[in-house]
Image (cartoon, rainbow, N blue to C red):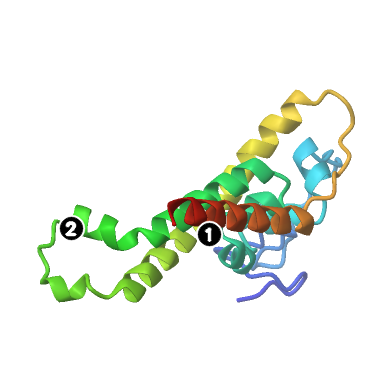
Amino acid sequence: MKCPKCGKPLHKDFCMYCGYMANGNIIDTKKKIEASKLEKYLGNDFETIIHNENAKEIFILGPLYFSYRNYFVLGTVLTLLDVYIIYNSRVIAQTFLNTPLPNFYLNFDIPVMLITFLLSRLIYVMLSNEIYLKLLTKKLAKSKDDIVKLGDGNKVNVIFSIIFVISLFLLFYFLNY
């Protein structure tokens, strides 16, 4: 059921966005509550990130989501780790499964890599916003001055991360060749 006031889904006959209740009452506090530093910094993205409504974005970007949110080093390192794990997923599967299945299941590299890719994306969708909010809360706690939005959602960082990861893999490929 959707809220008749704001159109968002009702949770247990209560709208968590505007305060509308199914019996027609509206929960409203008389005094204005000042927004926290986190709300001021995130602006319009606050509700989306808190309620994890950007799952498609995180699924597409994966570990690059952190680069997109101005944590370039973390995003790049996680991308390197993610690509390495996906690339070596057959070896990891053989090691941890200890081959209780017949060997023909593990001879298919593409399905094993695809399953590993989907599992890693599922983990990123579940945990990325929580990790990002904890990192951002620590960052904002350290800053003493007024909060200025620093242009979150930086696509240039994502491009630089991709270029860096590709160049590292090409470098290792040619060194081993």
Residue 10 on image: x %, y %:
62, 67
Tell me the kind of residue under disc 2.
Leu
Q: Nearer the viewer, residue 47 or 90?
A: 90
**Picture layout, residue 114 above or below residue 121:** below
* Residue plotted at (84% across, 38% down): 34
Query: Any mark on residue 97, and which?
Result: 2
Residue that mark 1 sits on = 125
Q: Residues within 10 Å of mark 1 (few under 14, many from 20)?
A: many
Residue drawn at point x = 64 percent, y = 58 percent: 162
Question: What is the tally of numbered marks visible in this picture?
Answer: 2
- The 10 Å Cα crowd at callout 2, few under 14, some 14 to 19, many 20 or more, is few
> Image quadrant of residue 8?
bottom right
Q: Nearer the viewer, residue 165 or 123?
A: 165
Q: Is residue 145 above or below residue 62?
A: above
Left or right relative to 143: residue 10: left
Which residue appears at 72% of the width and 59% of the height? 159
State the image coordinates of residue 43 (x, y, percent, origin top left). Answer: 82, 51
Q: Nearer the viewer, residue 78 or 124?
A: 78
State which tag comes first along the sequence, 2 or 1: 2
